[in-house]
């Protein structure tokens, strides 16, 4: 099984070779968009980020994404050095410079900045934050439902590295993804510290059982904005939805499974640990929720 796909798989778009990137207040060509080798993000993964998606001229849930960015920055004691309005304006300036109107994805990153010496202590980051916005033409293109494999890497306790923190330090998730690929899957299904099904290495995870939509309690997963929108859509449309603990036994016998994330919105899952989930194709509940979400974002 070598035909791996990804929840972030997009159509090839030659325009992305000519994109302009926002770096610390300057909008520069892709080839000139660089940060120092002394930057805290490069050296230590010391930073936070958001992925934001453009639908028909509107950045979906922009205020919520920026609020989450500022909450994460405060949690790691990082001063972004700009107001929420200034961050939003930087995003819109980058959009204008690139002439993008829809089907674009932005990765907005803030690190603790350039260090005076190549060591860990945050006091060595004395030159202010580094902020970068990479914005690409991006239309999801998934040839088939995702295949998942359960891995030994866990979504951990808040006192180790809180899974709610969208930090540059993604090594735990990267190791999980590597383990899944070694097992012949596309991405990893990760358990929490109690052995309950939690999330994948890149997205939040849902199952559908007998007309009910289940997802984790939220205690050990990213506080996903798309995840919450799906929960809200279920409640608004009379679909039973539960944030609860559930096991792999519950998961393997589910009628459907899908992932949520800013990039792919709702991505169907066809196989988990070699077991076909439902029909192995996108199920009716996933399709219904995708339709409701498209209405919500005006896609």
Image: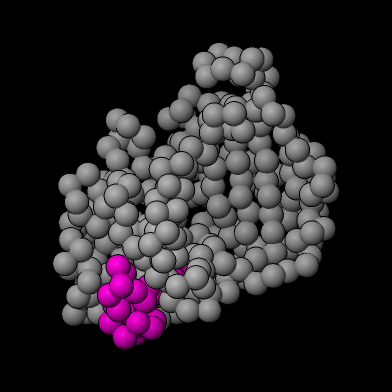
Q: Residue at x 78, y 67 (%)?
A: 14
Residue 152 location (% of width, % of height): 29, 50
Q: Quadrant of the C terminus?
A: bottom right
Residue 4 location (% of width, % of height): 50, 68
Quadrant assignment, res 128: top right
Task: Reply above or below: 223 against 79.
Answer: below
Residue 227 location (% of width, % of height): 38, 60
Tell whether position 290 is magenta: no
Residue 262 or 89: which is nearer the viewer? 262
Task: Reply above or below: 93 against 150.
Answer: above
Classify residue 242 as left or right of residue 292: left
Q: Quadrant of the N terminus?
A: bottom left
Task: Reply above or below: 30 against 248.
Answer: above
Does the rendering let one see residue 9?
yes
Q: Residue at x 47, y 79 (%)?
A: 144
Residue 145 or 220: which is nearer the viewer? 145
Tell whether position 270 is magenta: yes
Residue 265 location (% of width, % of height): 47, 67
Quadrant assignment, res 25: top right
Q: Residue at x 61, y 50 (%)?
A: 107
Does the rendering let one see residue 259?
no
From which residue to which does the magenta span run?
264-286
């Amino acid at each position: 099984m070598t035909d791996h796909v990804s929840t972030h798989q997009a159509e090839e778009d030659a325009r992305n070779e000519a994109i302009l990137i926002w770096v610390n207040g300057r909008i520069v060509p892709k080839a000139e968009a660089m940060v120092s080798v002394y930057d805290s993000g490069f050296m230590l993964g010391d930073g936070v980020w958001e992925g934001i998606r453009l639908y028909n001229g509107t950045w979906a849930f922009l205020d919520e994404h920026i609020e989450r960015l500022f909450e994460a920055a405060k949690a790691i004691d990082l001063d972004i050095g700009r107001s929420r309005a200034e961050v939003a304006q930087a995003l819109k300036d980058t959009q204008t410079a690139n002439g993008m109107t829809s089907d674009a994805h932005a990765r907005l990153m803030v690190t603790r900045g350039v260090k005076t010496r190549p060591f860990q202590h945050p006091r060595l980051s004395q030159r202010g934050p580094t902020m970068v916005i990479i914005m690409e033409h991006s239309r999801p293109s998934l040839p088939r439902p995702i295949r998942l494999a359960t891995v030994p890497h866990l979504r951990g306790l808040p006192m180790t590295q809180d899974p709610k923190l969208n930090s540059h330090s993604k090594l735990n998730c990267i190791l999980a993804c590597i383990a899944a690929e070694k097992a012949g899957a596309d991405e990893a299904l990760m358990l929490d510290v109690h052995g309950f099904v939690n999330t994948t290495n890149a997205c939040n995870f849902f199952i559908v059982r007998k007309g009910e939509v289940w997802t984790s309690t939220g205690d050990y997963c990213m506080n996903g904005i798309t995840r919450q929108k799906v929960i809200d859509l279920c409640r608004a449309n009379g679909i039973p939805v539960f944030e609860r603990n559930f096991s792999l036994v519950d998961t393997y016998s589910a009628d459907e499974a899908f992932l949520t994330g800013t990039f792919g919105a709702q991505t169907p899952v066809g196989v988990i640990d070699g077991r076909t989930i439902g029909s192995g194709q996108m199920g009716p509940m996933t399709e219904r929720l995708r339709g409701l979400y498209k209405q919500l974002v005006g896609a």
